[in-house]
Amino acid sequence: MMRGLSWVWPAVLLMLVLVGGAASEGSIAGSTSRYVRRLAESVDLPYDSPYFAVPNGINPPQQVHLTQGDYDGRAVIVSYVTVKLSKPKVRYGKTEGDHPWQAKGYTTQYKFYNYTSGYIHHVIISNLEYDTKYFYKVGTEEEGAREFFFTTPPAPGPDAPYTFGVIGDLGQTFDSADTLEHYLQSYGQTMLFLGDLAYQDNYPLHYQVRFDTWSRFVERSAAYQPFIWTTGNHELDYVPEIGETVPFKPFNHRFPTPYWASNSTSPQWYSIRRGPATIIVLSSYSAYGKYTPQYVFLLAALKAVDRKVTPWLIILVHSPWYNSYNYHYMEGETMRVIFEPFIVAAKVDVVFAGHVHAYERSFPVSNIKYNITNGICTPQIDPSAPTYITIGDGGNIEGLAANYTEPQPSYSAFREASFGHGLFDIKNKTTAVWTWHRNQDGEAVSADSVVILNKVHS
């Protein structure tokens, strides 16, 4: 879609509503998709797959990926790996092939049981201009330098359109490749990644080589647009029986987050502003009870949001708080009971989650009057509450979650067990369009779509 034609999207939106391709939240009854996808077991890509190929050179930078490097979007963290020790630096500029500026970073390395990582380099490029395309080069010419590019977001503001891609539980299977290739055809500008990356812990001794193959696999996307990382259960890598007792150690070495920029004390929870949205990332597998650091952080982060500047408020978490599949049923309940009153009061627009290997979208719903301990658990449709979207259907080795609870709960708007990705397309301060795209369809086709109205400005 051409964003320069400001008159196009309202016309397209009206057409979608008229033909039933999109609907406003709460305007239709919930449904379970009749689409029947083959439920064959997922298969990991072989280690000699072209997706995992090491680039040419004597010490070429590989596994290149980006994330946001500050609170407001004027910095990026460029991360990459070399087999031999190399100076961590990135050259960059506004013209392809011309890199007049340079940023230096730091190098880290970790051991996990009998595995030693390559040299992992992280470089923060700061003081970037908004809404600008930059070309950057990693590595020296002698080593096998490589050039990529990225585009910074618009300045935080109420009417800047912006599109987020959303993927969870990706893995590195043939289905994962379909998901990533499908997403690359879209117009997503930044990836909201909902946790469970490489599934290295599905292999003996949490086989860390899987992080290397996965990072080369996603480079075709992650080297060109920031991935906003959420940690899932597969990133814990807590294995005391082999002496690994530091949770999230490999993840924290490989995938830095700008947690310091939002006064967080942990890489696992943080917040950023990007264009018209504030995004708050939470950790399902870190302590979140009353007065814990994560609890204190969330309350402060919600209080700091200025909806006049960033009208859209999004939360990322791994384990869903509302889930009508039999898989991982109610696993997010304690976190919901503790945090839901605060996010309803803050008028959060959307909560994205992964973990369940299927797709589900709720109506705006809350259950703040009750909790599971009092025996009266009755979620209610609440226009001031968030929409909950579970999209843990990236293509992982564990396969799809194909069994639903029956009957379908009244809060559940749409559910389907297929692999795919989503797009959260913010039009302005009042309106966004959410679309979910199953892998079997063309990118222009959405298997589920809905118009989401802003909780503060609509």
Image (cartoon, rainbow, N blue to C red):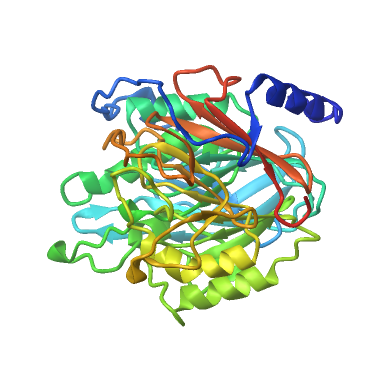
In the visual, does 90 lie left or right of 282? right
Q: Quadrant of residue 417?
A: top left
In the visual, does 432 lie left or right of 178? right
Residue depicted at 38% across the width and 68% down the height: 286
Q: Position of residue 403 (x, y in %)?
A: 28, 36
Residue depicted at 50% across the width and 33% down the height: 421
Q: Position of residue 278 (x, y in %)?
A: 66, 57
In the displayed structure, 89 sits above or below 225; it is: below
Total numbered circles? 0
Residue depicted at 47% across the width and 56% down the height: 379
**Residue furthest to the bottom:** 291
**Residue furthest to the left:** 241
Q: Is residue 56 something one can see in this rendering? A: no
In the visual, does 262 lie left or right of 252? right
Q: Is residue 211 something one can see in this rendering? A: yes
Q: Position of residue 389 (x, y in %)?
A: 50, 45
Q: Position of residue 353 (x, y in %)?
A: 46, 49
In the displayed structure, 255 sits above or below 181; it is: below
Of 125 and 365, the residue lying toward us: 365
Of 235 and 108, the residue lying toward us: 235
Which part of the image, by quadrant, shows the N terminus? Answer: top right
Q: Quadrant of residue 25?
A: top right
Of 6 and 37, the residue lying toward us: 37
Residue depicted at 31% across the width and 65% down the height: 247
In the displayed structure, 36 sits above or below 299; it is: above
